[in-house]
Image (cartoon, grey):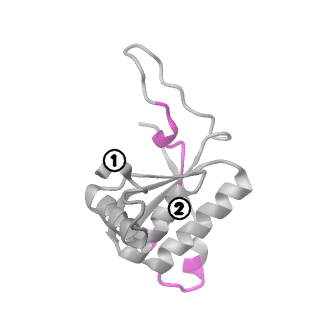
Amino acid sequence: MGSARPNFIGSAAGALGINMAIRITEILNSNLSTNPLKEPGEQSTVMNTADGPRVLKVEGTIHLKDAELLEQICSDLSHQTGRPVIIELSEISFLDSPSATVLCRMKRQKGIEIKGLNLFNKKVIELSDSSESEKIPNACFPDLV
């Protein structure tokens, strides 16, 4: 497993004395930006970190203000670098409905991908999306039918 060197994004908020429920860390040399093996014996190719997606790992509890901050960070990062952004959410302990709506909106944006959600958090996002728009149920995660 390659070593991932963290780059703390949310440190400015901490320096300002803002109590945040989440920690957002940029992961360099992440295995999320590797292409999976397609056939036995085929070598894996790792994207050049200068060209590959930016990977942000989010930990803790996500409330509406946190989700809006994450959305702004991802949008700015994607526009400034011209590279896609992967949001890794496997360490999320709580997700409320308003923040789930924001995450679903982010997932629909070009250049932003969400990974690492457990089934419960996927379901929270799915339910918040379908309650907001009855016409398109499961638009955010169609594989949860």
Q: Residue at x 61, y 69 (%)?
A: 72
The magenta segment is 13-35
Measured from the top left, where is residue 105 in percent x and y?
Answer: 51, 64
Disc 1: CA contacts within 10 A as few (<14), some (14-19) or many (>=20): few
Q: Is residue 44 above or below residue 14?
A: above
The answer to which of 48 and 96 lies nearer the viewer is 96
Residue 32 shown left or right of residue 76 in the figure? left
The answer to which of 8 and 105 lies nearer the viewer is 105
Measured from the top left, where is residue 129 in percent x and y?
Answer: 40, 66
Q: Quadrant of residue 128?
A: bottom left
Residue at which label 1 appears: 143
Residue 27 shown left or right of residue 59 in the figure? right
The answer to which of 6 and 76 lies nearer the viewer is 76
Residue at which label 2 appears: 106
Which quadrant, please, contains the N terminus?
A: top left
User: Which amino acid does the dot numbered 2 rest on?
Assistant: Met
Measured from the top left, where is residue 108 in percent x and y?
Answer: 53, 56
